[in-house]
Amino acid sequence: MNTVINDTQPILQMRGINKTFSGVSALSAANISIMPGEVHAIIGQNGAGKSTLIKVLNGAHKQDSGEILFQSEQVDYQSPHEAQMAGISTIFQEVNLIGYRSVTENICLGYEPTRFGFVDWKKAQAHSEAMLARFGLTLDVNKPLQDYNIAIQQLVAIARAVALDAKVVIMDEPTSSLDDKEKEVLFRVIRELRDTGVAIIYVSHHLDELFQICDSVTVMRDGRTVERRDIKGMTKLQMVAAMLGRNEADFSDETNRSKTPLNSSQNVLLEVEHLAGAGILSDVSFKLHRGEILGLAGLLGAGRSEIARAIFGLDQAVKQGKVKIAGKEVNYPQPIHAINNKIGFCSEDRKEDGIIPQLSVRENLTLALLPKISKNGFINEQREREIVEQFMQSLGIKASSMEQPISQLSGGNQQKVLLARWLATDPSILMLDEPTRGIDVGAKAEIQNLIKSLAKKGMTVLMISSEFEELVDGADRVVVIQEGKSTCEIPGELLSENSIVQAVAHDSASAKQTGVSI
Amino acid sequence: MNNVASNTPTQTTALLKSDLLFNKLKQQGSLLALIFLVAINIIFTPHFLEIQTLYVNLTQVATVAIVAIGMTLVIASGGIDLSVGALMALAGTIAPLIFLSEFAAQSPILGLSLAIFVAIFAASICGLFNGFLISRYNIQPIIATLILFISGRGIAQVLTNGELQTFDHPAFEFIGTGRLFGVPFQAIITIVIALSIAWVLRRSIYGRFLLAVGGNEQAAKLAGVPTAKIKMITYMLCGALAGVAGIITTAINSASDANQTGQLMELDAIAAAIVGGVLLTGGKAPIIGALIGACIIQLVGYTLLANGVHDAVAMIAKAIIIIAAVYIQQVKGAK
């Protein structure tokens, strides 16, 4: 095989890539260029188009227009497998290997050495061991892959890529499930690969890592690649600013809105103390006062959703720490217990956790309420209709009738139905996870106003949002979550996009210096 | 609707109307197919319009229809139940064991009631066991119900040493051969079961929760739906209905046959439920559809048999009907 490395020509280029999904633009005129032996980061907010770009690159998606040049030749892969065989390997967040097959089989899958037409397992084993040895790994290659932890599995995936003579290795959030020590091993392997001339595309939300491992970065925003530069000399604040599409200078002290400072007489309704668990949370503490909107800010993967889910009794029960409601410690094993204690939770994933697509607007809206409007197991349908009518009117839900299947509604109207589902249960605490994600601008403003008016009427709201603007506009106070910890609190009078960006981008020590207190 | 129609009145209403008509046609597809089948028979099958033919068909369709109702519930929950045929055999063998016992000889009425109750109860418990495996241990329904598919019939065979139990018990046989106001008794049982379950589904919390679990289990759970409980109830109901069907079969034959009762019933029931319009993705439970589906399956078999076509061909015909029904569903889903 040709192993000559040309240091002056990019090994991979993507030029003017456009891609739309059912009319919505996911990528527009995206460009990427990587040199051999370069570790290149791609950053951007959720939905900026990073995953789509990778999927176009490895053949999982087909671009609408634009070209991909690999080793100066135009390529067009039909599947990730084809791309991998050609030298572009992707290591996904969740390792896409076959857990119950042996390490050897995973490394050699698709190109097993054969002898008389049969797989030569001895040769395959030796080959696998040699590949792993390059990274200082000695494993029993006959054991099923799933017997090893995620870090090892990831290294096996990398070994497979190397074994296939990969010239470009794409890593999508490779460290999301690794601890510090495992990260070090991974970084060492990445550096080793880099030194042999392999180009690495590194996608991560953990900005700190990028400074450790990457040489250059492409920033993506709204499907565009807006900036490409060397990482050297760049600050974390600059990265966040570029991701959000603002000048660093924009984040001056423009506290644009004075929030009423917290009234000490307002009593605490929900108190979270040193919450840990759910795989990602390590130490979360905050207080939610009656009638306030508390925002949870942080980067994706910081553990904000997990906090709400832990409180609500989803996934895993609270492992460590305390959740107190009105001073009483609670640990709900199931959502129903949280609901019975007047907590509502609108999850971020409308499709997976929200709507029941086959059911009507009416049936979706009253799902959480049903036990309360039923007697002896039978639903009081007249009451149900009245309630649905009332909420459709007050929230302005646009549907042909309450019997229309919810799947036919627009995203914004679906979200309103889901909000109504919780409002109908008359909760005292409403937890909203990305309440305006993926809906159009008009409906977005309506929902944001609705949340504000609810709080005005005394509802207590915990709002998780990745849009700092939304938090500044809506929240009375913001708690910043970083890597599973609540690192600081921004009181209303200091709340601005600037202060949030500073707090999210800096470690807690420097956040303190910028006037943000814990 | 109003503001939509007011935009371009004639065009939009026409569009809406044709769309509605189209949807209705698709919904009533199985009913149309049934009418078509009956028409074909009236033309081609000799003696089709005789009352005897109706009786034969009603007698034969009742058990399929009852099991198909249970299957519809299970499929609507997002699952499948392969054990129904075996549970029919189990209930069908338990009942005679009790009403032929010493105890029943002394107090016949109590003995008969107990026989029916215990048989159905046993089938329900088996159904509950299915539901328990599926909801508590997250076992795939097709695997979980395979356990009783195999062992349920085995238990029935052990209870009777694999032998045929024949009996002469007019009161019990009435369930399978009697008539009320000229209508076969098991047809009445079927209708009563269908209507009451359809009513419960429409009006009760259980019905709504069932559709929610089948439609999107994760979302249902998040909205406080007790998903495990709903599934267990559903499999239990399905088991109970299989038990009823087993008793009817035994009563028709005046004998319980652990080896033959309910053979291949799971397939007929699944076919009837699918032809009736239940969505394999869950979230919809057309009970009356299951009745119509069962009638179609029954009538196809009867038509071919009455016209001298070999039994094996009837099986192929059933397969074609299932393929057609699933295809129509796919088209519906795509729309």
Image (cartoon, helix red, strand yellow):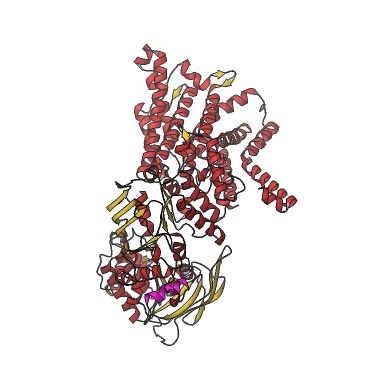
Question: Where B68 sits versus B138, above or below?
Answer: above
Point 38% across, 64% down: residue = A298
Instruction: State the image coordinates of residue B142 (x, y, percent, origin top left).
Output: 42, 44
Q: In this rendering, would B166 be left or right of A489?
A: right
Question: Where A227 sits versus A410, above or below?
Answer: below
In which image quadrant can residue A499 be found?
A: bottom left
> Considering the image in quadrants, where does the N terminus of chain A appear?
bottom left
In which image quadrant can residue A181 be found?
A: bottom left
> Considering the image in quadrants, where does the C terminus of chain A appear?
bottom left
Toward the viewer: A70 or A285? A285
Question: Where A181 sits versus A330, above or below?
Answer: below
Residue A333 is covered by the magenta coloring:
no
Q: In this rendering, would A125 be left or right of B266?
A: left
Toward the viewer: A240 or B97? A240
Task: Name the outermost residue toward the right.
Answer: B10
Instruction: State the image coordinates of residue A478 (x, y, percent, origin top left).
Output: 38, 61
Instruction: State the image coordinates of residue A300 (x, y, percent, origin top left).
Output: 40, 64
Query: Is residue A126 at all visible to an observer of this figure?
Result: no
Query: Is residue A105 at all visible to an observer of this figure?
Result: yes
Point 53% across, 26% down: residue = B192
Toward the viewer: B242 or A237? A237
Task: Name the outermost residue toward the bottom.
Answer: A8
Task: Name the outermost residue toward the top.
Answer: B106
Residue A234 is covered by the magenta coloring:
yes
Instruction: State the image coordinates of residue B145 (x, y, percent, origin top left).
Output: 40, 40
Point 60% across, 47% down: residue = B328
Magenta segment: A232-248
